[in-house]
Image (tube, rainbow, N blue to C red):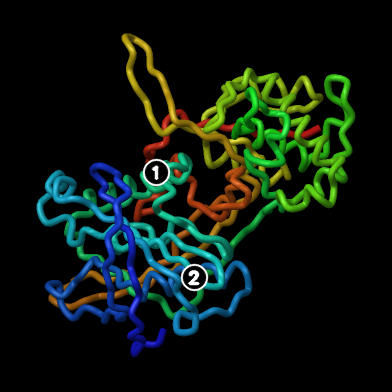
Amino acid sequence: MNKNLKNKLYVIIFTSLLFYSCGENNVIASFDHSTKPESFKDISYKIPVSDAVFTVLDVINSTTGSTRSASSAEIENIEVVKTTPAITRSLKANSLSSDTLLYIINFKDGGFGVAAADSRTAPIYAYSDKGRFNLKDTCQVLALKMFIKSAIHTILYDINNQGNNPRFAETPETRNELLEQVGPFMDIEWSQNNPYNKECVIGTEYAKAGCVAIATAQICAYNKYPNTFEGYNYDWNTIYKIKSSSDQYKYPDATNQLAHFIRRVGLNVGMKYGVKESGAKSEKIPGLLRKMGYTCSDLISYSDKGLVESLKAGHPVYQCGFDKESDYFIFQTHSDGHAWVVDGYRYEMLNIRICRPRRGEMDCDSEKRRFLFVRNNYGWGGLYNGWYQPFVTMPNANGKRIPTFAFKPRMITNIHR
């Protein structure tokens, strides 16, 4: 890395962890490289912005073959996720050396990364070589909100449990390594809006198609099945050519077929249609898939193992979860949910440099740790699709997976004809 790199980066928008608000605040951060600590007192857990950018680019380059470097990459903006004094006080004394937890890094020519700002936790949580990640959207987009909350939970867990254990992460000279990849299987980027909701009408207005219906339809499109359902025929070879909404004009007949199929899915699962949002229970999807002629699992609790096994067999996974959980008398209720498709996974070997004081001197070693990233297709027309650490269980700094904020995380695996 170029240690003389002094470009100014504009850091915009920070969230309050305590209230999870979406206020904006403009701050300028210096793009300086940190140096190796000479003594225990010199140890800083803060990861400089430059190191975070380097880590994100290193991971993207190692998996896509890109050659963008930290010195040549143009930064569009960096958003910062911060704690609040109340959260700091709730942790062990002196365990939180900085109020910055995450950097959301967006590149001008496309791509983003969600990187840690503290060296006591995993270095990167999500990345993509295209698209943007807008922190403000986490207030409206439930799956993004769940992801950010899960990352925050994991980071605070690491900080609280490691406390002042002497640990200093320094950007490694060696490239990160892609160990294994399966997928992504899909290049379709459908949404709940036009033209997919053309048959979802309430009075004179169009309702949202519903995330449950879109996730199901995308999996059916990948499998190109069923050919016939409830008396209607579907030309999946042509339907699958509809990669995004702009293709509706190239394939008008197939677009009408797709809109009709999405409506049939909604009717079969009891979709409650609304202009702003539509919702249905994912519990009904396994039965519907079997009615169509598929073999699949039930709606089961999420596990990394089950997800990876399904993807390794070539079967995309239907995943869902909730952001809120409430108690009502003796019952638990869940709300603010989302369903999406996971259509690939990667195991990354990330190099981490660890420094510990030993006999009055700093002893530094490089460690390699394996991390799982899954490819999420959120059903928002391609927005925010990318490689994410599974946010229903995230690894802490020692590689142990811990439960996070997503409530009732479940999935349907092994969906095939």
Count neighbours of disc 2 (C-alpha within 10 A) and say few if under 14, some if 14 to 19, many if 20 or more: many
Q: Which label belongs to residue 331? A: none
Distance, label 1 to label 2, CA atoms, is 22 Å
Write down the residue under mark 1.
139
Q: Residue at x 62, y 38 (%)?
A: 192
For the residue pair 360 and 120, the one nearer the viewer reads as 120
Image quadrant where residue 351 sits:
bottom left
Whether 139 is drawn above or below 75: the answer is: above
Q: Is residue 137 visible?
A: yes
For the residue pair 416 and 265, the one nearer the viewer reads as 265
| SS under mark 2 | strand
Which of the image's four quarters has the N terminus?
bottom left
- Would residue 171 appear left or right of 207 to someone viewing this image? left
Count neighbours of disc 1 (C-alpha within 10 A) and say few if under 14, some if 14 to 19, many if 20 or more: few
Q: Residue at x 33, y 13 (%)?
A: 328
Write down the residue under mark 2.
107
Where residue 24 sits: x, y (%)?
30, 56
Where residue 403 sits: x, y (%)?
38, 38
Whether 415 is drawn above or below 282: the answer is: below
**Residue located farthest toward the bottom when viewing the structure as drawn:** 4
Look at label 1 and name its amino acid.
Cys
